[in-house]
Image (cartoon, rainbow, N blue to C red):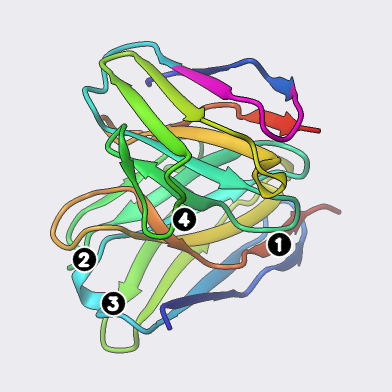
């Protein structure tokens, strides 16, 4: 079964850091681009960042550029996002998501269950 | 950044009705438009990709159409399990963006 399992969420003070992880199973992780998408409480979906299959290309939404870093370890089938200088507006459920198609950027066909990040003093 | 505007924000309908959801882009995304369904407490689920292709396991009553800036998700006859929020997303230009969602409620 294809599965994504996020971890690492929690409560952090403004200005703090957190590292989220997403463990992948049931597919050839190294062949697919991966992404992080977040959803603030009661709000819609917001794309955060994407990384190519090899890890050589990364993209970010402007609001997290310079603060968040997406990475992947293809030997461990794991996706990460390092989040620094966290702000209240980063409070959200963070989902990792897999691209539909090998070799190119595509729709997100598999999503994890999400991990909650709360930034508050 | 491409802005996606979904309308209406909320639709109040009954089972068996035909539904048409709209997603308009601020500039052309060619056919790189995706539709997701999300139910409360759940992750989004891929429904339509490349504007008109149903994802695996999605019933035939769902169809997508459009290109350029105007897109539509149609449900031919609402089933009880279809009541949810539907989001469109463009994959044509970075940064990727989502619409604000349309809630289909009973």
- Letter of the chain that mark 2 sits on in the rendering: A
* Residue at mark 2: A53
Name the N-terminal-most of marks 4 and 2.
Answer: 4
* Left or right of B88, for residue A59: left
Do callouts 1 and 2 point to residues on the same chain? yes
Q: Which residues are magenta?
A: B12-23
Q: For mark 1, give the secondary structure.
A: strand
Q: For mark 3, give the secondary structure.
A: helix
Q: Position of residue B26 (x, y in %)?
A: 38, 11
* Residue at mark 3: A29
Do callouts 3 and 4 point to residues on the same chain? yes
Q: For mark 4, give the secondary structure.
A: strand
Do callouts 4 and 1 point to residues on the same chain? yes
* Residue at mark 1: A116
* Most foreground residue, A91 or B70: B70
Label 4 close to label 1 by CB (< 8 Å): no
* Most foreground residue, A96 or B18: B18
Q: Position of residue A11 (x, y in %)?
A: 78, 64
Quadrant for the N terminus of chain B, please: top left
- Mark 1 to mark 2: distance in Å? 25 Å
- Mark 2 to mark 3: distance in Å? 8 Å
Name the N-terminal-most of marks 4 and 1.
Answer: 4
Task: Name the residue at the right extreme.
Answer: A121
* Residue at mark 4: A36
Report whether residue B4 is seen.
no
* Left or right of A112, for residue A29: left
Question: Could you classify mark 2 by the number of other residues whose Cα lies within 10 Å: few (under 14), some (14-19), or many (20 or more)?
Answer: many
Name the N-terminal-most of marks 2 and 3.
Answer: 3
């Amino acid at each position: 079964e294809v599965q994504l399992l996020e971890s690492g969420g929690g409560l952090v003070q403004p200005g703090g850091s957190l590292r989220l992880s997403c463990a992948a199973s049931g597919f050839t992780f190294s062949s697919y681009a991966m992404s992080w998408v977040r959803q603030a409480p009661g709000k819609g979906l917001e794309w955060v960042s994407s990384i190519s299959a090899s890890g050589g290309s990364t993209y970010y939404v402007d609001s997290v550029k310079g603060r968040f870093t997406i990475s992947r370890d293809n030997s461990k089938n794991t996706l990460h996002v390092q989040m620094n200088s966290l702000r209240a507006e980063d409070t959200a459920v963070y989902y990792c998501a897999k691209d539909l198609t090998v070799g190119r950027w595509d729709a997100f066909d598999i999503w994890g269950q999400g991990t909650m990040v709360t930034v508050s003093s | 950044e491409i802005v996606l505007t979904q309308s209406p924000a909320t639709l109040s309908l009954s089972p068996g009705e035909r539904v048409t959801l709209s997603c308009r882009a601020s500039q052309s995304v060619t056919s790189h438009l995706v539709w997701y369904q999300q139910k409360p407490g759940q992750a989004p689920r891929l429904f339509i990709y490349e504007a008109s292709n149903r994802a695996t396991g999605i019933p035939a009553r769902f169809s997508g159409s459009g290109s350029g800036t105007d897109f539509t998700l149609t449900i031919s006859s609402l089933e009880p399990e279809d009541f949810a929020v539907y989001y469109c997303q463009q994959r044509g230009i970075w940064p990727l963006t989502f619409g604000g969602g349309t809630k289909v409620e009973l």
